[in-house]
Image: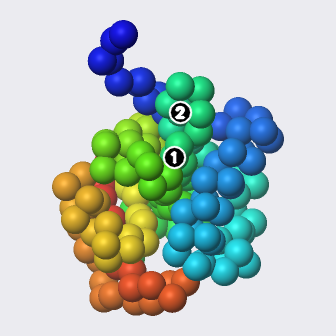
Amino acid sequence: MSNTATPVVVVPVQNEGELFQALAIREVVFIEEQSVPEVLERDAEDANAFHVLALKGGHAIGTGRLVMLSEPPPGESGAWGRIGRMAVLSSDRKSGIGAKLLTALEAEARKRGLKGIKLHAQLSAMEFYKLHGYEADGAVFEEAGMPHLEMKKSL
């Protein structure tokens, strides 16, 4: 027997079946675990977003998405995007999967020529994003019943 851990790969969502896997992960994490109302978790941006899946042994264990912003943040120029709906199943958290998802989404943003990324970080995830170069941008606000902080990163 090998002690080698099953590798995790992050891939773009290519079809409706893969999108359903991403939505299922979000349902478990946001709707079931964090009690986010489904009407807030699901939105029209899903149809046009760039989604990724983290796969381990062929099973989806994490997801995230990138959407284009209609205008840059105040004081910024060029095209910006927003990363959101990052979720990893509880059994696979704290193992670097979030970082892999974030890296893949940032790579897509660079590929699209975006100048930067914004996101709404749950306060519990703020340090994670700081480690990846994001800076707080504004005051704490409530979203889906939880405290969040807007953060941004120039690419």
Q: Is residue 102 visible?
A: no
- Residue at numbered disc 2: 55
Q: Residue 123 falls in which quadrant of the image?
A: bottom left
**Labels 1 and 2: the sequence-earlier one:** 2
Furthest residue toward top:
1
With 108 as the anchor, is 140 left or right in this view? left
Of residues 22 and 154, the one drawn nearer to the viewer in this rendering: 22
Amino acid, disc 2: Leu
Is residue 7 depicted above or below 64 in this figure? above
Q: Secondary structure at mark 2?
A: strand
Q: Residue at x 39, y 85 (%)?
A: 147
What percent of the width, then of the height, locates residue 98? Answer: 38, 48
Outermost front residue: 1
Tell me if 119 is positioned left or right of 3 in this view.
right
Against 125, residue 17 (above or below) is above
**Quadrant in which the N terminus appears:** top left
Q: Position of residue 114 (x, y in %)?
A: 44, 48
User: Between residues 102 and 32, which one lies in front from this camera angle?
Assistant: 32
Q: Position of residue 135 (x, y in %)?
A: 24, 67
Evaluate whether residue 140 shows in this view. yes
Q: Secondary structure at mark 1?
A: strand
As drawn, 129 above or below 53: below
Colour convention of the picture: rainbow
Identity of the residue drawn at 42% across and 24% down: 6
| Residue 46, position as x, y percentages in the image | 70, 58
Residue kind at label 1, given as amino acid type: Gly
* Residue located at (28% from left, 69% from top): 126
Q: Is residue 31 left or right of residue 142?
A: right
* Other-residue count near label 2 (Cα within 10 Å), few / some / many at <14 / 14–19 / ≥20: some
> Number of callouts in the render?
2
Mark 1 surroundings within 10 Å by alpha-carbon count, few (fewer than 14), some (14 through 19), many (20 or more) = many
Query: On the image, numbered disc 1 is attached to which residue?
Result: 62
